Image: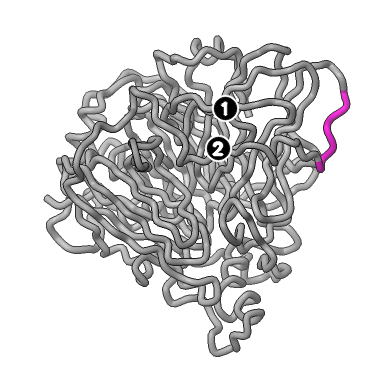
Amino acid sequence: MQTPSRRTLLSAPFAAAGAGLLAACSDSDSPSRSGPRHTAGTAAFVPQGPKGFVNPSDPEVLAAERKRGSGPVRMVTFTAAESMLDLGGRSVHSWAYNESVPGPLVRVTAGDVLSLTVSNRLTEKTTLHAHGVRLRCDMDGAPDLTQPPIEAGTDFVYRFVAAHPGTYLFHSHVGMQPDRALYAPFIVDDPKEPLAYDKEWIVVLDDWVDDIDGSDPEQVLDQLKPGGSMGMSMGMGPGHGGPSPHRSANTSAAPSRSRKRMGPDRVLRDSHSQMLHGEGGNVSYPHYLANGRLRTDPSVFRCNPGDRVRIRLINAGSETAFRVALGDHAMTVTHTDGYPVQHKRTDALLIGMAERYDVLVTAKDGVFPLVALAEGKKGKALAILRTDKGRNLPAADARPAELDREVVPARRLLPAESVRMDDRVPDRDLRIRITGTMQKYDWGFDHKPYDVRQRHAVRAGERVRLTLINATDMWHPMHLHGHTFSVTGLNSAGARKDTTIVLPHRKLVLDFDADNPGLWMLHCHNQYHSESGMMTVLGYQR
């Protein structure tokens, strides 16, 4: 992962392999210019579902995109393919973008047009989702909802205006593909950056199971379902066997190699987290990664004593929350999910799947472990901050005392004034129950599994209040595509986010403005939950 100085960032805001610069196009919202390559037809995609809703490429969507402006075009290509990856002393066979884990850093400046070609060289369909980005609907990468999946052997060009600065994440949105290496960091720089810092460190965290002793994510998902190892352990007989009939439309056929191999039981049965009010998760991952490396051979970030370092923390994991701390340092939280907050000091952070936090630290003299503890599980990821010239590194099992000190939760963060939502009475109330059990593994909303034809209706211009009621024994990181919301509190609007943790048997109230027409997924970002049915659709009525 690149670790440029702030001066370098400002002089070269886009640093991705194969990048090019073109003049801005006045018709960048034209589907024919940004549609699929090597696929049949150029007509706008219309998903299944009731009529009367704004479809992904309808005029309302294109008009919203025009309002975002049109800056220089930045061009990148991701090749999704089977790859041999070095995790730091251990090689694995997996799927990746451009044969790297994480995938290559993509960096643009707010207002730029990103033209990202996904070349699918896998043996199955795929898509790419720009997680947290408020973009045009037909570039959102939700398979069978905003686009047909990209067929094997074909390309698709994602083209959209990156209007809002922040720390974001690219990942596949098909099946269990995100639990491989199909993810990459995406940074949108602010041309008027208000923060003062000397260096930047991007840290991408992940939980890893693919190609370890014969395991793969599809196999683990089947183990979690009734009739798998989890179901049998809870007294459910063979009559419950087989994959869930509610496997979402987001899932394509499991890869052939998963049917040829039998990995060990990966179901976690003794997980507990006080912070998460229950189980930490249900998958026992053999490894956790920081910037694609095992803790026995960690990546090292170098800077000078006294440097002010901006750390962008990204949880690309599929089933693990990480408690993160930097040894012998306090952190000042400046952003969450790309949006600025009133600065808050903390010793550690709890980061759910697909959440992002930006923090500032002033580097001390020496060598210090940045540890990401797998919350409620056994194991951790490790990276190193170094300001001296020595060779010794912290032990692989280092546990900074800061991990057990103050942890500031997202609900206690307040938005910076520049992004605070104005006080306004909601025009619409949506109440959605989060349902399901570990025993049946029947995750969903309001006791229903995902169906692409579902619609929770909103209208453009409304202030929407979304109340999520967690009726399960499990915590869930909930993500809304295409929007940011404010986590409401007793006295004021909370931080602007796109992904947030809902604790078991609690409710969370979120306010957002319906300002981005189209069809948008709301789902749990536990990949195993979403693929078992915990997804639904918010749709803009005409």
Residue 451 on image: x %, y %: 32, 66
How far apart marks 2 and 1 lie (CA) works out to 8 Å
- For the point 41% across and 49% down, the residue is 479
Please give left or right for residue 17 compared with residue 265 in the image: left
As rendered, which of 220 and 355 lies closer to the eye? 355
Evaluate if marks 2 and 1 touch, with contact meaning CB atoms under 8 Å apart.
yes
Q: Is residue 268 magenta?
A: no
Crowd class of label 2 (few under 14; some 14 to 19; many from 20; radius 10 Å): some
Residue 522 on image: x %, y %: 36, 54
As rendered, which of 427 and 187 lies closer to the eye? 427
Query: Mark 2 or mark 1: which comes first in sequence?
Result: 1
Residue range highlighted in magenta: 391-397
Residue 100 on image: x %, y %: 63, 39
Residue 475 seen? yes
Q: Which residue is mark 1?
A: 345
Q: Which residue is mark 2?
A: 408
Overall secondary structure of the magenta section:
loop
Q: Secondary structure at mark 2?
A: loop
